[in-house]
Amino acid sequence: MPEIYKEDQGKISRVILVTVIMLGAVFALNQLHGFLGANAGPDRNLQGFIDEQGRIEGIGIDWRYLVHAPLIGLAALFAFRQFNRPKTADFLIDTENELKNKVTWPSRKEEVNATIVVVVAVLILSVFIFGVDQILRQCISFFYKGF
């Protein structure tokens, strides 16, 4: 098995990267599975090997899984390559270290106050836009009824 580049650093961000890549692959394969359809893929030459439900005769599995297996393997290889690639790993290690050591995270009180300010600002802006919309609606209806 190949050695992992800087194994003891950036574990959280590297695991998140691999998880995101693999979840993306699973969702893409799910879409591909539906797109192919059970009876849409095999050629007429394979009619003796594929039954009406899209299963391979004698094995009993859906033929689409034979397409998925190598693709999920390729996604896993790509994810491991990104996990172990020095340029990507160094970026993720630096990002994780910066988030842990250099970013100033607000306290709970500061976060609550900032949230209240945002909610109040959104409400005020919503009322203002609603008022302008009503005024413009009345003006437009006045002009259209006049003709």
Image: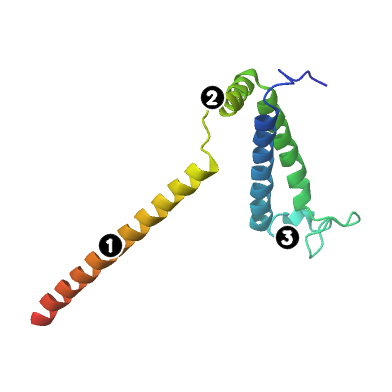
Q: Secondary structure at mark 1?
A: helix
Element type where label 3 sits in the image? loop
In the rendered structure, are the residues bearing label 2 and label 1 in contact, judged by CB atoms less than 8 Å apart? Answer: no
Residue 129 image point, x, y percent: 27, 62
Question: The N terminus lies in which quarter of the figure?
Answer: top right
Residue at 56% over, 25% down: 98
Q: Which residue is mark 1?
A: 129
- Picture quadrant of residue 134: bottom left
User: What distance separates the C-alpha of mark 3 from that of mark 2?
Assistant: 53 Å
Mark 2 Cα-neighbour bin, 10 Å: few <14, some 14–19, many ≥20: few
Residue 147 seen in render: no
Q: Position of residue 86 (x, y in %)?
A: 64, 18
Measured Cα–Cα span from mark 3 to mark 1: 51 Å
Image height check: is 100 above or below 48? above
Residue 51 x, y percent position in the rendering: 82, 62
In the picture as drawn, the residue positioned furthest to the front comes out as 109
Q: Residue at x 44, y 46 (%)?
A: 114
- Pick whichever of labels 3 and 2 is earlier in the sequence: 3
Q: Of the residues shown, which amino acid type is indicated by label 2?
A: Lys
Which disc number belongs to residue 38?
Answer: 3
**Residue 57 in the image, given as x and y percentages of width and height:** 87, 57
Check disc 3 and give the amino acid type: Ala
Number of the front mark, 2 or 1: 2
According to the image, label 2 marks what residue?
102
Between marks 3 and 2 in the image, the one whose residue lies nearer the viewer: 2
Dot 2 lies on which element? loop
Query: From the viewer's perspective, is 53 left or right of 98?
Result: right
Colour treatment of the image:
rainbow
Q: Residues within 10 Å of mark 3 (few under 14, many from 20)?
A: some
For the point 75% across and 52% down, the residue is 64
Q: Is residue 63 above or below residue 69?
A: below
